[in-house]
Image (cartoon, grey):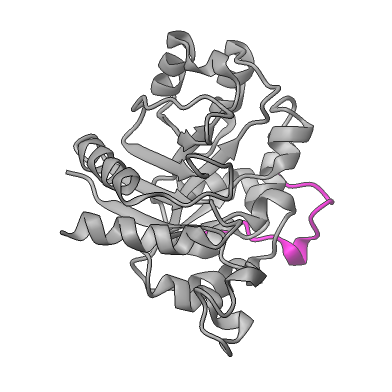
């Protein structure tokens, strides 16, 4: 049986202050507060811009040693380049500090835009570029260009641990068997995304990691999960754990539901 970890997607939300975060808690202490309460945290600032090694190191130090930090891949790769000609952008992304997470590096999430349909050749080429170990990350990171200054790059590691990748798609063509088979061939996890029906939800297990993102089941990013809905997700998670490790992230942060729902699901899974 794999391990089930539950957490939140991001942690720096002003409207959580005085609600999930106690009044008076310093902003720089919010990640530590969340890390003490959840089994994992998803870093999503990395999607919007290249971060710094010092930031990744700070995040790692803020959470307990047994709390992995998943990292969301950069939108420059997925949304602007749409996965074409991305070897250098990937090198820049991985050189920006991902290795500073060390043994606490969780799965790397690649989220595709809803306009990007499945193309076998494009996806296979992209999957072949993905580093599969910390040493592979370092080798790829060393090929970064001058968009990332040397003093902002981290390209060395003493670890040789595996690196897992997962794909969150938003075009229905990825639900076809050919697409799912390609994910299996490349050992890339299929993200189970609950999006209030806006985008397709595939529950295929395509690697030894099952990655779940709960964006809201009735209203995207805003609605909370009812007790019965959380019961159903707990049952699903227990079943998926037979195939490998399960990571669940709540992204319904609009009304502050994410941390409360994450705690409620975590409690169910601990029974």
Residue drawn at (58%, 90%) of the image: 24
Q: Which residues are magenta?
A: 142-158
> Residue 271: x percent and y percent?
15, 59
In the picture, the quarter occupied by the N terminus is: top left
> Residue 138: x percent and y percent?
57, 50
* Residue 115 figure quarter: top right
In screen coordinates, is 237 left or right of 215?
left
Residue drawn at (63%, 31%) of the image: 112
* Residue 263 figure quarter: bottom left
Can you say whether 128 is above or below 38 in the image? above
In screen coordinates, is 45 left or right of 33?
right
> Residue 87: x percent and y percent?
69, 34
Q: How many marks?
A: 0
Residue drawn at (36%, 38%) of the image: 210
Nearest the camera: 29 or 194? 194
The answer to if 267 sits in the magenta stretch is no
The answer to if 156 sits in the magenta stretch is yes
- Extreme residue toward the right, this view: 146
- Res. 47 visible in picture: yes
Nearest the camera: 28 or 153? 28
> Residue 91: x percent and y percent?
68, 44
Can you say whether 46 is above or below 192 in the image? below
- Magenta stretch: helix, strand or loop mostly: loop
- Res. 62 visible in picture: no
Can you say whether 228 is above or below 19 in the image? above
Nearest the camera: 241 or 120? 241
């Amino acid at each position: 049986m794999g391990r089930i970890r539950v957490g939140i997607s991001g942690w720096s939300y002003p409207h959580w202050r005085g609600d999930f975060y106690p009044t008076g808690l310093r902003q720089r202490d919010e990640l530590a507060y969340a890390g003490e309460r959840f089994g994992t945290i998803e870093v999503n600032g990395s999607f919007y811009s290249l971060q710094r090694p010092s930031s990744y190191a700070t995040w790692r130090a803020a959470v307990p040693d047994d709390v992995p930090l998943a990292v969301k891949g950069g939108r420059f790769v997925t949304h602007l380049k749409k996965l074409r000609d991305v070897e250098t952008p990937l090198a820049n992304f991985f050189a920006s500090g991902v290795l500073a997470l060390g043994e606490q590096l969780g799965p790397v999430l690649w989220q595709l835009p809803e306009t990007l349909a499945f193309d076998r050749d494009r996806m296979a080429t992209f999957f072949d570029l993905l580093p599969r170990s910390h040493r592979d990350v370092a080798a790829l990171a060393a090929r970064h260009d001058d968009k990332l200054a040397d003093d902002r790059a981290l390209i060395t590691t003493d670890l040789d641990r595996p690196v897992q990748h997962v794909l969150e798609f938003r075009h229905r063509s990825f639900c076809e068997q050919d697409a799912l088979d390609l994910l299996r061939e490349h050992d890339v996890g299929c993200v189970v995304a609950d999006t209030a029906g806006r985008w397709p939800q595939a529950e295929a297990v395509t690697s030894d990691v099952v990655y779940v993102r709960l964006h809201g089941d009735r209203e995207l990013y805003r609605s909370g999960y009812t007790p019965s809905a959380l019961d159903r997700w707990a049952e699903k998670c227990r079943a998926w754990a037979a195939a490998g490790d399960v990571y669940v992230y709540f992204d319904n942060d609009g009304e502050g539901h994410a941390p409360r729902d994450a705690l409620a699901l975590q409690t169910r899974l601990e029974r």
